[in-house]
Image (cartoon, rainbow, N blue to C red):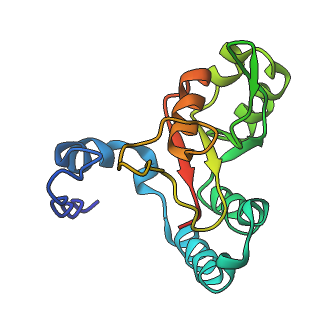
Amino acid sequence: MTEPTPAPPPPPGKSLFSRHYLETHLPRHAEWAEDAGPAFARMAELWERAQRLGATWNENQTETEFLRPALEALGWAFIPQAAATRGGRLSRPDYTLFNDAAARDAAYPLQGDDAAFYGRSLAIAEAKHWGRPLSRQSADGREQWDAGTNPSHQMVSYLVGTRCPWGILTNGQ
C-alpha cells in the first residue's frame, strides 16, 4: 500500500477538517481503500446532465433527477420524508440517511419515535430546487432567522429537532 498523497492546504478560514485529520485519520478508515471510480463516474454523469437541465427543475425534479441518484451512487441508504416531532410540531427533513439497507430497514418501524429512529441514522438531508440560494439576508444585510424562508436555518432546526450529528443541505449545485 502506498502512502496517501497529502491534501493541499485549505484556503485560510475555509477548512472543514484539519489537515492532520485528512492526512492521518481518514486514511485509516476501510472506506478510504475502496475504489471510488464507479461512484465518481456516476456523479460526473449526473453533474453533466444537471448542468444542461437543472435550471429547469423544481425541487421534486432536483431530488428525482439528481439528489436521489447521487445519494445512491455514494452508497447511502435513505428514507424520504420520515416524520419527526419537534415541540409538538411535525417536521420532515427530506431524507434520513443510513449506512446501509439493513440499518435503514431496521429504522422503518421506529418512525414516530424520534430518539430511536434518528438515533440509528448517520445524517439527514434537505433538498431545494436547483440553484436556490441556501441562505437569506434582510435588506440591512443581517442573516434572517426564519426556518420557513431560509433553508440554512431550516436545516439547523431539523438538526436540533432530530439530534442527528450531520446534515446535508443542497440545491444540487
Question: The N terminus lies in which quarter of the figure?
Answer: bottom left
Viewer-side residue, 100 vs 159: 159
Farthest residue toward the right? 109
**Does residue 54 lie above or below 74 as drawn?**
below
Viewer-side residue, 117 vs 7: 117
- Does 13 sit left or right of 89 as displayed? left
Q: Position of residue 21 (x, y in %)?
A: 24, 42
Q: Position of residue 93 (x, y in %)?
A: 68, 37
**Does residue 30 lie above or below 112 as drawn?**
below
Farthest residue toward the front? 140
Farthest residue toward the bottom? 52
- Does 105 sit left or right of 73 as displayed? right
Q: How many marks?
A: 0
**Does residue 50 lie above or below 87 as drawn?**
below
Viewer-side residue, 55 vs 93: 55
**Does residue 50 lie above or below 137 as drawn?**
below
The residue under the point 27% across, 41% down is 25
The residue under the point 70% across, 42% down is 95
The residue under the point 24% across, 50% down is 15
- Does 22 sit left or right of 85 as displayed? left
The residue under the point 70% across, 45% down is 77
* Quadrant assignment, res 147: top right
Q: Position of residue 146 (x, y in %)?
A: 55, 36
Q: Position of residue 79 (x, y in %)?
A: 76, 40
